[in-house]
Each structure stands twice: as structure tokens, then as C-alpha cells.
Image (cartoon, helix red, strand yellow):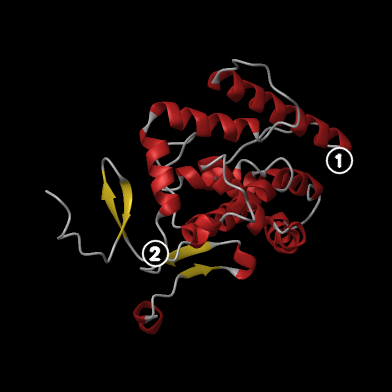
Amino acid sequence: MATFARHGTSVVCVGAGGVRCYAGILSEALTTRWLHRQARAWADDSARLGVATRMYKARFDTALPEGVTLGQLRGMEGQRVKALYRLLARQHGIKRFKRAYDPAEWDEQDPVNRALSSANACLYGVVHSALLALGCSPALGFIHAGSQYAFVCGIADLYKTEVTIPLAFSLHDNPNPEQESRRRLRDQFKLLALMPQIVTDIQWLLDPEVEVGRDQRTRDNAVVSLWDPESGELPGGVNYADDVW
């Protein structure tokens, strides 16, 4: 680890298949461009609302009415998830399902809830790894707040209805739903190429104008730049002694 640190290598400590993220050691040469965008958007109420709105709208497959509020989007998303629970419960012959998570009574919960909690934890690990690799802060969330994993939770929500929720219901009669959900997710993450999609979505959320795949700004070779309130970013490593005072 000391050798990695000396050579400026980013290290993210994960579980098998990336479904756990235990720690991250970021390279000193890692660009802070995406962290700057995140911090600016988070600190400005209007920009934060814009990111939060894009996060909610990204979960819907249909167009939304103009002027919809964040509160209305929260309600629509909640209704959509409940409807999905009912649909999957009928498909798998489950008479009644209610989402519950209680670590103190883990073994007393039904297999779907145990599988869903375990699968979501795996998804959080993958999202956390992607955020660290981009240099973003997992704590500066746009929908969730008050946790060191607030942004992790918000990004992970984009994929639950397509990935973890259907998987959890498919394990309703599995004798070991927690272990099986982790095993299947490792395969599914590779099949869906989820990590590249997560990176693309984070960049789009923080900068809707980004041209994913062709954007050179994510490969900024500048080690450091200078900030100026009037001129913006200026190149570092330049002697400005001859500038007019």
C-alpha cells in the first residue's frame, strides 16, 4: 500500500465482483473536476434542485408534465415502486409483501426482504466504488442528506427497479436468499456492464451537457490549476510575475 501511495495510484478496496466497498485511497493526481461540479451543484439550491429532478426523472420511462415539483416526483416514484412490488408479488405467487428492514430481527424477515436488503447493499458497494474512482464525494447527496453515503443512495436508486427488486422477488423461495442474491448480482453486474453505466449517469447528472464517450474533460492531464474569481481556472506552473498590477 505504501508503494501504491508513493506512485500516486488510486486503490479502491472491494469485495468479490465489487459488491462491497471497504475503503478508497485516491491518487493525488486524480482530477477534482467532477468533485468541483458536484460541490457547486450541491451548494446552490437551484442547481441542487436541478440535479435532484434529473435523478427522479431518470427513473421514469414516460414523459413527465411540465412544472412537476420535487414532492410530486417523490410521490410518483413511491407509487411506482409499490406498484412494482404488487406486480412481482402476483407473478411469484406471494400473497402479501411489505418492504421491511430491521437488522435486529434479520432472521425473522421473509426471504424477499432479506434478499432485497442484501442486494441493495451490494449495489451500494458498486456505486460507492464508482464515485470514489471519479473523485466525487459520497456524502454530498442531492436527494438524500445527513449521511456519509447520501450520494451513494441517490445513485443506487436509479437501478433498483431494474436490478435488485426483480432479483429479490425471484428468490422468494430460496433457502439462502442473501448469499444467492450476492452471487447472482456479481454475474448480473458484468452482464449489464453496470459500472460504465453508473459512471456515465453520474457525469450526466452533474453536467447534462457532457458528451459521454467523447468528452475529453474527464481525461484532464493538468495536475493542478489556479482559481480566479474573474477569469475562472488558470494554468498552474506559470510565473505570473510579469502581469500588470
* Badge 1 density bin: few <14, some 14–19, many ≥20, Cα 10 Å: few
- Regarding mark 2 in the picture, which secondary structure is present there? loop
Q: Amino acid at mark 2?
A: Ala
Image point (17%, 54%), residue name: 243
Direction from residue 93 to residue 45 in the image, left or right: left
Where, by quadrant of the figure, is residue 30 drawn?
Answer: bottom left
In the image, taking residue 55 as reference, residue 48 lies left or right, namely: left
Q: Residue furthest left?
A: 245
Q: Position of residue 81 (x, y in %)?
A: 70, 31
Front residue of 131 and 178: 131
Residue 92's disc is 1
Quadrant of the frame with the N terminus: bottom left
Q: Position of residue 105 (x, y in %)?
A: 56, 45
Residue assigned mark 2 = 222
Work out whether mark 2 precedes mark 1 in sequence or the reverse, and give the earlier one. Answer: 1
**Residue type highlighted by circle 1:** His
Residue depicted at 28% across the width and 50% down the height:
227
Identity of the residue drawn at 45% across and 32% down? 48
- Dot 2 surroundings within 10 Å: few (below 14), some, or many (20 or more)? few
